Amino acid sequence: MAQISLDEIAHSYLPFPKTDADYALKRIHNIWDDGGAYALLGPSGCGKTTLLNIISGLLKPSKGRVRFGDTDVTDLPPEKRNIAQVFQFPVLYDTMTVFNNLAFPLKNRGFDTAYINARVKEVARILELEAVLHKKAEGLGADAKQKISLGRGLVREDVAAILFDEPLTVIDPQLKWQLRCKLKEIHEQLKLTLIYVTHDQVEALTFADQIIVMYEGKIVQIGTPQELFEYPDHKFVGYFIGSPGMNFLPCTMENGKARVGEHDIPLDDRTAALGNRATGSLELGIRPLYLTIHVQETAGSFQVPVQSVEDQGSYRVVALAFNDQTIRARIAENDPVPGSRAWVSFPKKWIRLFENDHLLK
Amino acid sequence: MKKWQDNKGWLFILPVFIIVAFSAIIPLMTVVNYSIQDIFGPGQRIFVGTEWFKETLTDPRLHEALWRQLLFSGLVLLIEMPLGIAIALTMPTKKGLGSSVCLVLIALPLLIPWNVIGTIWIIFTRPDIGLMGAFINNMGITFDHTASGLHAWITLMLMEVWHWTPLVILLAYAGLRSIPEAYYQAARIDGASAWAIFKYIQLPKMRGVLTIALLLRFMDSFLIYAEPFVLTGGGPGNATTFLSIYLVKIAVGQFDLGPAGAFSLIYFLIVLLFCYLFYQVLLNVGKGESS
């Protein structure tokens, strides 16, 4: 186990990259702590898997160095790196039994039989694979297969980190939740460094201590789920995290208030001061969860037409026309549902200002 | 609507049925018809029952031809299957000019007509003007496929391997290309050796295409006719008289249609039996393994 440092990593799949656009990973400079549970979150094609493969050694970065602890592993192949990786689709050795599948990484490294036996049994117990241990891997269901893939990742005790590349994509929702809890449990027990790639924010938020949000080959923000939710560094994080995504309204500063069209939205002192200092184009951002909706006129609220109300089960999403834009608000199941008009207010505490797409702070 | 009124559906398979009837069923039944009669001429025939079958099955020359045939097919499979897999493994894996050129070069022998192949090799191995024949004879080794049965066999094997290994290569290559990259990545992470990758990933994933390759190569080599016919006509002596060559001698050379019909049916059943056995074995291979 070791700290993982990524030193000015950049990667391009082209042999002679010229412009910035040729790079799948633009510039990654980061240190990941030993024993942390990290999630790499971002839309498809943002470079998550590329970054993961660079850490595991399946790819050699075009630029930069990878270090595990004090050792520079940039030029080492994956088998010499002490790393485990679990892939999106279950990878099995079909002709082997479940036991031999789990034992394979250990056998290749020449561990003795007694140790292998004990270790495989232990992992099989954790993953609840004991019943099928001596069956052929080929005939099992998708979830059992993916558990075996997970197991091959967990079986080695000496690994610096276990990397997961969207490992639960093929699993049924119910089991997905169970396996995620299992992983979390394993992380707490074994204190392994886990790096988990996903495009599913729920998965990232429940699994990780630290979430790394990636967008177009760059890391846009690293933080706890709460930080990402309350203080998104970049508009993209605001959109991508939370359901529905953050509302953004272009605004200007007028007397310490944010002016959106003809409406003046009051701000708290700190936010107002930040807004007054800004020189670029300003936008006001607020999470749908924090917008307050009233069915009758209330002090400090704006009257707006209601466009639609969507029932999402445990909550409702109300779409409102605010100054020629649509903003969304989340209301609880039991809250009164507005008719054709509603009054909306913006609690000062939850208003964020963004200058040229970046959070003012 | 009741189910029996839905019989119009059968019309859909009628075209196929007619084609198969003319291409296979009717000719086959004609052979069955010949095999149980003694035919003297048009309109003169007597029913002989299973007599031709008894005669054919006890014919010592047929037994010799059958063993020769089995040895030949066995050798062909033993050489072509491993060689084809080995060459497929060394081919370029990335799409591009390299793999395209390789594929075209490898497929070339498959494009040459069978009788032309025989002629090419006759000339190639001739001791006086053939490149290979002259070369070997100049080294002091006498090589003449018209005089020595062994030399005729060597020439035939070379011809066969040169002609048909490409088919095994192409099939094996297709099988290898269909293995997802993640398998190789996982194997690298697991620290697997090249041999382990071959044994546990490539070979099991190629099982389907290799079964097809094996069946095709077995059937084709078991039915070999054109090459030995062109090379030595079954000689020297009876050294390369395989089943099909012997069959043609009976049917066309001696015009014994009755025994030839019985022979054909037995021949057909032998091929069918072996294909079934191979298929069953390959289908179940490796499935019995436990810890």
Image: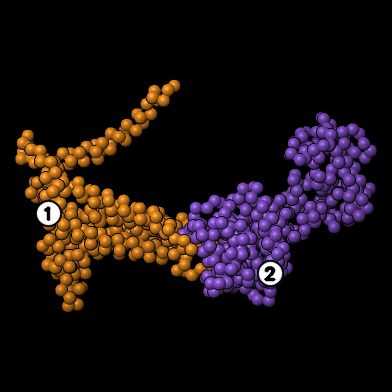
Chain colours: A purple, B orange
- Disc 1 + disc 2, Cβ < 8 Å: no
x, y (%) of residue A313?
A: 74, 39
Most foreground residue, A342 or A14: A342
Q: Is residue B269 left or right of residue A63?
A: left
Name which residue lies at 14% across and 47% down. B53
Q: Secondary structure at mark 2?
A: strand
Q: Position of residue A67 (x, y in %)?
A: 66, 72
Q: Which residue is mark 1?
A: B59
Residue B112 can be seen in this image = no
Q: Is residue B156 left or right of residue B100?
A: left
Decide: few, some or many residues near mark 1? Use Cα within 10 Å; few <14, some 14-19, many ≥20. few
Residue B90 visible to an observer of this rendering: yes
Tell me the residue at 61%/71% (across/down): A82
Disc 2 is attached to a residue of which chain? A
Q: Which residue occupies the foreground of this view, B58 or A206? A: B58
Whole-number angstrom distance, CA of label 1 to CA of label 2? 78 Å
The residue sitting at 64% across, 47% down in the picture is: A173
Query: From the viewer's perspective, is residue B32 above or below residue B68?
Result: above
User: Looking at the picture, which amino acid does disc 1 mark?
Assistant: Asp
Provide the chain ID for the residue under circle 1: B
Position of the N terminus of chain B, as image quadrant, is top left
Please tell me in which quadrant of the rendered image residue A215 appears: bottom right
The residue wearing badge 2 is A4
- x, y percentage for residue A162? 64, 64
Residue at 21%, 41% in the rendered image: B28
Q: In the image shown, does A251 or A178 lie closer to the viewer?
A: A178
Q: How many marks?
A: 2
